[in-house]
Image (cartoon, coloured by chain):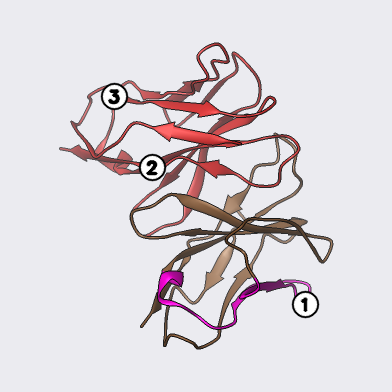
């Protein structure tokens, strides 16, 4: 079956620090990969996605590259802001599935 | 930008009572989903719905759960006889299709508390 493993949090950083959140996956077939973000008091928002090997998804300064050889989709941002404080979820979806499979989520707190 | 909206934001119910959680998906979307997140745990898939039928469901989605699209806009999740372990955040989502470039869009969730 499908599974997603994220690095455990919480992660606390200072503004302008570099952020990496590791995500690895197990899946049958060739899944699409996603990062969702949940800001305090809000729902899940799609942050970025990648649909095939070596694709790079990017949005709001965040990037993640679909690495089939290492079954990974690590999220990175070069210079975080206080407004990036949120819970980040890695997720995958097989083409023949309806459901998203989520990782456990990583809480990120950025201090001014 | 169009949004998925969920009501209520917080529902408190006595154990054994029925509860209905409501969602209004994005208007041109055809696929609808429910997920839940028990406090401190992963977001888990419950069910997907297309063309007035359940297209996929998880082991969690037993006979106590049902979904319905009673009119052209609402999508509901009913829990027939709630248990303490049903306490969770419930997320509704919708998508235009199931392709890789048709991602699921989520609502803000309903926090269900069973007493």
Q: Where is residue A3 in the image (x, y as percent from the top left)?
A: 52, 36
Q: Of residues B62 and A36, which is closer to you in this image?
A: B62
Instruction: Provide the residue designation for mark 2.
Output: A105
Image quarter of the N terminus of chain A: top right
Chain B's colour is brown
Instruction: Provide the residue designation for mark 3.
Output: A79
Quarter where residue A83 is shown: top left
Q: What chain does badge 1 belong to?
A: B
Q: Which of marks 3 and 2 is in front?
A: 2
Q: What chain does badge 2 belong to?
A: A
Q: Is disc 2 placed on a helix, strand or loop?
A: loop
Point 24% across, 40% down: residue? A10
Q: Of residues B25 and B20, which is closer to you in this image?
A: B20
For label 3, count other residues whose C-alpha is less than 10 Å away and answer few (under 14), some (14-19) or many (20+): some
Q: In this view, does A39 lie to the left or right of B1?
A: left
Q: How far apart are marks 2 and 1 (CA)?
A: 34 Å
Image quarter of the C terminus of chain A: top left
Q: Is residue B67 above or below residue B55?
A: below
- State whether residue A87 appears in this view: yes
Q: In this view, does B38 lie to the left or right of B74?
A: left
Q: Do labels 1 and 3 share a chain?
A: no
Chain A's colour is red
Region rendered in magenta: B63-87
- State whether residue B74 appears in this view: no
The disc, 3 or 2, on the residue closer to the chain's N-terminal end is 3
Q: What chain does badge 3 belong to?
A: A
Instruction: Provide the residue designation for mark 1.
Output: B71
Magenta run includes residue B77: yes
């Amino acid at each position: 079956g499908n599974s997603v493993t994220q690095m455990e949090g919480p992660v606390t950083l200072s503004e302008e620090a570099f952020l990496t959140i590791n995500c690895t996956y197990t899946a049958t077939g060739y899944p699409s990969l996603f990062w969702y973000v949940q800001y305090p008091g809000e729902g899940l928002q799609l942050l970025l996605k990648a649909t095939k090997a070596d694709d790079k998804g990017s949005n709001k300064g965040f990037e993640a590259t679909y690495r089939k050889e290492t079954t990974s989709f690590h999220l990175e941002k070069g210079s975080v802001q206080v407004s990036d404080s949120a819970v980040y979820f890695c997720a995958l979806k097989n083409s023949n599935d309806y459901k998203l499979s989520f990782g456990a989520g990583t809480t990120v707190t950025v201090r001014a | 930008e169009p949004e998925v909206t969920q009501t209520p934001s917080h529902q408190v119910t006595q154990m054994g009572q029925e509860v209905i959680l409501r969602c209004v998906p994005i208007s041109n979307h055809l696929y609808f989903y429910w997920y839940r997140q028990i406090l401190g745990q992963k977001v888990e898939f419950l069910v997907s719905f297309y063309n007035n039928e359940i297209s996929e469901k998880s082991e969690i989605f037993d006979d106590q759960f049902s979904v319905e699209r009673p009119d052209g806009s609402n999508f509901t999740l009913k829990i027939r006889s709630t248990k303490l372990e049903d306490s969770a955040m419930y997320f509704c989502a919708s998508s235009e299709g199931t392709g890789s470039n048709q991602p699921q869009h989520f609502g803000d969730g309903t926090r269900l508390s069973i007493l």
